[in-house]
Image (cartoon, grey):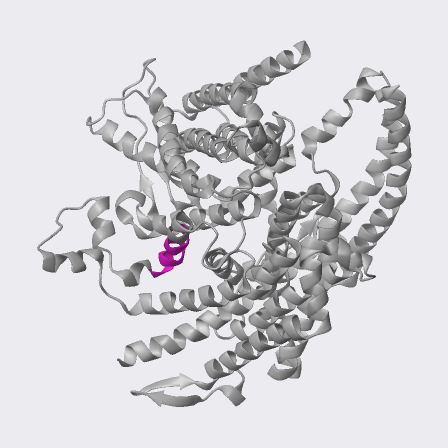
Amino acid sequence: METVLISVLNGLVYGMLLFMLASGLTLIFSMMGVLNFAHASIYMLGAYLAFTASQFLGFFPALIIAPVVCGLIGAAIEIWGLRRVHHNGHIAELLFTFGLVFIIQRLVQMTWGMLPMAYRVPPVLDFPLFSLYGVNFPAYRAFMLLVSGAMLLGTWLLLKKTRVGLIIQAALTHPNMVSALGHNVPRVFTIVFAGGCLLAGLAGVIGGNYQTTEPGMADSMGPIVFVVVVFGGLGSLAGCVVASIIMGMIQTFAVVIDYSISDILRPLGVVFTGDTLFTEILTVPVARIGALLPFVMMVTILFFRPRGLLGTRDT
Amino acid sequence: MRSRWWLILMLIVVAIALPWCFYDWTHHRHAGFLISMLSQMGMMVILALSYNMLLGQAGLFSLCHATFFGIGGYATVHLLNAAGSGDFPLPMEVMPLFAGLTGLALAILFGSMATKQRATAFAMITLGIGELMATSALMFHHFFGGEGGVTTNRMIDNSLFGLSYASGLQVYYLILVWTVIATALMYYLTLTPLGRMANATRDNFERAQFIGYDPRMVRFLQFALSGFFAGIGGGLYAITYEIVTFDALAAPLSANALLMAYIGGTTVFGGPILGAILITLLQSGVSLLSNSWLVYVGVMFIAMVIFAPTGLAGIIKAHDPIRQAGRLGSLVVPYLRLAIPSLSLVLGFVGVAELMSFLTIGAAQGRKLVLFGGPIDVHATLPWAISAGALLVGGLWLRFEAAGFHRVWESLTTEARR
């Protein structure tokens, strides 16, 4: 029971972190039709910037500064890069952001070096919040939940309840009409791209000290986030929330399940012996293949529902 | 048309003769580095060309191409081991064919899922598939050997021509033969109705649908066949290195296939060949010297995406009308005028990038930046100022010259068209 409860909490924390990344990606995609491959790189940049800023100014100013810088970088990418390749079609845009991954990755290594940074949880938040069956739940994780929850609420309010959100939504479906009404549609696109990068940067700030701030963090996070976005359905924000939480839960629960397929079949009288690839797949415990599960889930859902969990349209 | 056949023939002759041009007659030894580089080029040509069957010909941006390359490699390693122990008497020369069939089988399996979608969704799904396979390779030791990979011995003593494949040169010629065969087959495919329909679905898939073709089927066939050819490349990889680790199917190799195909030029059939040769050459040269190799490739790639989406081969092809009009000579001076600021820009950029990387990565490795015969202090202001200056001046000057070049180019092309 206690493992289940602790895993649920941890899964929720990880899932909300995934959501912060995936929501920016989904927003950009549903607005502009561009899948930003460099999204996880911006996340990494956010963590590094927050580390540097927190050394001089402390954690809480860094919580504001790093995402804003990431947003500005995003705006620059949109204005000087994406807009120029836009007329060459979607593939060119994808390729452009794909090239950015290499550059940001290496620039980060060139600026901060190859070693992990000592980006730690701020002392104010470094205490156990409560204790469950003798296991402490760190206050910082609760803070992460708070920030991501506030972000979810903020994004939803901005998109659904404000005039800006209305224009953004209109520009998504009827760009020409919005343009004819006197709104600057390219600027709306820039704002959305910058906003998505800002969210990624924010995720980097709070994720950088939850995980480790090192040059490989974009590579390890990127594929999972893309899986979340595809799993939830490309362009669907609601699907994104559900998929993030599911992925977070799966990843944390996989670590504590020590059963394999053959363990389930054993009571039925089926016993596997021998040393082949087939028996290896059947006898490997779930805990060992935890990293594999998101991709298996993605392939499975695509097989049965190509649009993803809550997706409404084919791309 | 005839000149193209001459070009192909010349390429093959050069590829055959090149190892002998660097033969060490005093010690009767081949240049090992050259032969391994040429072998690598052969595999990469197959990989890049098969990748272009997707990106260039069908407009599919795949991110799991190395999966099929790698699975071909793993299959070959296991086949070689079986052949070595006598369980599977098969001559060496046909091993790559079986590697290709493995690639085909896996591509049929994954293709049936991935080709349900196109464009962005297709890219995402292939990314997931690529990660799925790379992660499995690390987890399942029986087939993939985990992190250590699977090793083999290529001297199975079973050859159609009585060769032992003990030396790198024999392996290189095997690679060359398979590269020529695969390239010819892939070229032939572009002439078949399937190749034409792939182009049609790339350009306008709705219209292709209206004519009565199923774009999904076209995508699927193209995907499966490109997996076949990638598998052949992987088989050659396994034969050359006698070890296959998960690097052979991980994401960096997929990215490499994309870079080679795109930088070479996706719109011309021969473009990826050019890209594969160029990138392999740069990789074996520059990556040994510099830590910032990926930055250069990335910047080159992005510059191509923005300014020259047709790639290097596309740029060369754009000169055709001017060449036919016999006015190629009048482009020499404008090109020279472009060259000077470009050189300054490139040198400035390399300078800044190297200074930056030596400040952090180089310091961690304990290496010093040595240039012009002496060590350079990366903390001093002067080298930074010179590099930044060269970068800025070169950039501004190039903008100015590019405008002039554009005018000359426009007037020449209108003249050639007339």
Q: Would residue A7 be found to the left or right of residue B18 on screen?
A: left
Res B316 → quadrant: top right
Q: Quadrant of the C terminus of chain B?
A: top right
Residue A85 visible in this rendered orientation of the protein:
no
Name the residue nearer the viewer: A236 or A257: A236
Taking the view exactly as shown, the residue that stands out farthest to the top is B2
Horizontal and vertical percent for residue A306?
A: 45, 49
Q: Which residue appears at 32% of the width and 58% of the height?
A: A289
Horizontal and vertical percent for residue B231?
A: 41, 32
Question: Does residue A103 show up magenta in the picture?
Answer: no
The number of discs equals 0
Q: Does residue B280 sit above or below B139 in this rendering? A: above
Res B399 → quadrant: top right
Q: Main secondary structure of the magenta part?
A: helix
Q: Would residue B43 be found to the left or right of residue A164 on screen?
A: left
Instruction: Give the magenta-colored segment's residue range.
Output: A290-299
Q: Quadrant of the N terminus of chain B?
A: top right
Name the residue nearer the viewer: A53 or A290: A290
Horizontal and vertical percent for residue B33?
A: 51, 32
Q: Which residue appears at 59% of the width and 67% of the height?
A: A200
Residue B187 visible in this rendered orientation of the protein:
yes
Q: Would residue B146 be found to the left or right of residue B128 on screen?
A: left
Question: Does residue A297 show up magenta in the picture?
Answer: yes
Res A175 → quadrant: bottom right
Q: Which residue appears at 47% of the width and 32% of the height?
A: B217
Name the residue nearer the viewer: B210 or A99: B210
Taking the view exactly as shown, the residue that stands out farthest to the left is A269
Horizontal and vertical percent for residue B21?
A: 57, 19
Name the residue nearer the viewer: B410 or A307: A307
Q: Does residue A308 sit above or below A53 in this rendering? A: above
Q: Does residue B320 sit above or below A255 in this rendering? A: above
